[in-house]
Image (tube, rainbow, N blue to C red):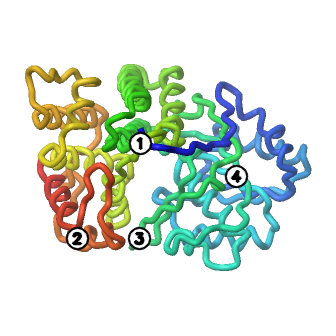
Amino acid sequence: MIGFEYYNPAKIVFGEESEKKLAGLLKEYHVTSLLLVYSGDFIKSLGIYSVIEESAKELGIHLIENGNVVPNPSIDLVRELVKQGKQEQVDFVLAVGGGSSIDTAKAVALGIPYDGDVWDFFEKGVSPGEVLPIGVIATTASSGSETSNAAILSSGEWKLGFEDDRIIPKFAIMNPKFTVGLPAYQTFVGIADVLSHLLERYFSDEKYSDTTDYLIEGAIRALLVNADRLLKDPKDVNARGEIQWLASVAHNNFLDAGRSADWGSHRIEHELSAQYNITHGEGMAVVTVAWTKYVADKKPWRLALLASRVFGADAYDYDEKERALILSEKLEAFYKKLGLKTNLTQLGIDDKDFEIMAKRATRNGSVGHYEPLDAGAIQSILNLALQK
């Protein structure tokens, strides 16, 4: 077990009608000018917008809003919002929605107090001085960005991340009922995203990490159980609540304690979604199946352990490589059960851009900690991802 520091100050307000506590939360931060960031009119049909409007009126807060966020959020919109935020003297950013809205809000909170271009944080790794406080009303169960210290943005060619504890939201309101009306596809790509965060953390080279090993294994079991419940009854609020909480647990860095997570699969998927604008959760399903096949032949022990403990692959019947391949098969079967695509051919993607994507992913060196990947390895994984 390696040394670690854990810090996450996000306040979680979870449960039915939790959004009604918004005014009290905003009052704590003495907000005078609030920028609301979201995507589409769903926040009005869910009743969220009226709660925000009433809270702002009650506290005398100037409310500015923008509902133009799109999946794989763009730096162009962030720049526009930063400019507007400076003009309106915004001192708090509130995101409503999922990872795209939250990551947009985080980037805007970085950019408003900053004199340069907000893309500097993502491209150059500039360390921020001041960061505006951020709040979240989560309406999906997927990215876990509502309690994470990370944000991902796209410039078209590049999809880059930025991490800093100062962009952890001050509070996250989670009412599972808000997720009931999500389309099935959005629900299930969200589950694939949650699973990807758990798997990335599990795939660690640290052999003495029993506490987090068992916590992650338990979280994966809980995710599988509740995904099955939603397949049977999409309106099961308890299952949706479990998954919404799992999304946060999977990505609030608590499960990183004492171990070094891999993240190689995410770097590959970021290239795919930057190049082809595919949905991140489905992209992670495709990459995870291919990555596990590739790593089964290189370094199978962690994969074999998970296959045995969660999926029942008996070590007496199968060696490490065989169990690692069983894991890949079990994951693929799970994604298919969710109705997701599991190879690039199904997504209409061929191999013409593999080389350039692999070079972009490794521009700063190999990616992944459990099994470091150079450009050649990434191309091999992408080729495996083509196979039906």
Query: Which of the pair 113/374 is nearer the observer?
Result: 374
Residue occupying the point 8% across, 21% down: 317
Q: Which mark is residue 259?
A: 1
Label 4: how many Cα within 10 Å (few below 14, some 14–19, many 20+): many
- Marks counted in the figure total 4
Residue occupying the point 43% across, 37% down: 187
Q: Nearer the viewer, mark 4 or mark 2?
A: 4
Q: Tell me whether the residue at label 3 lies in contact with that at label 4, contact meaning CB atoms closer than 8 angstroms.
A: no
Label 1: how many Cα within 10 Å (few below 14, some 14–19, many 20+): many
Q: Tell me whether the residue at label 3 lies in contact with that at label 1, contact meaning CB atoms closer than 8 angstroms.
A: no
Is the N terminus in the top left, top right, bottom left or bottom right quadrant? top left
Badge 4 amino acid: Ile
Q: Which residue is mark 3?
A: 158
Direction from residue 94 to residue 227 in the image, left or right: left
Q: Which mark is residue 353?
A: 2
First in sequence: mark 4 vs mark 2: 4
Direction from residue 34 to residue 334 in the image, left or right: left
First in sequence: mark 3 vs mark 2: 3
Based on the displayed image, in which of its 4 quarters is residue 158 positioned? Answer: bottom left
Q: Where residue 163 sits in the image (x, y, percent)?
A: 54, 58
Q: Nearer the viewer, mark 1 or mark 4?
A: 1
Badge 1 marks a residue whose secondary structure is loop
**Residue 153 in the image: above or below residue 258:** below
Q: Where residue 143 sits in the image (x, y, percent)?
A: 48, 45
Q: Nearer the viewer, mark 3 or mark 1?
A: 1
Badge 3 amino acid: Trp
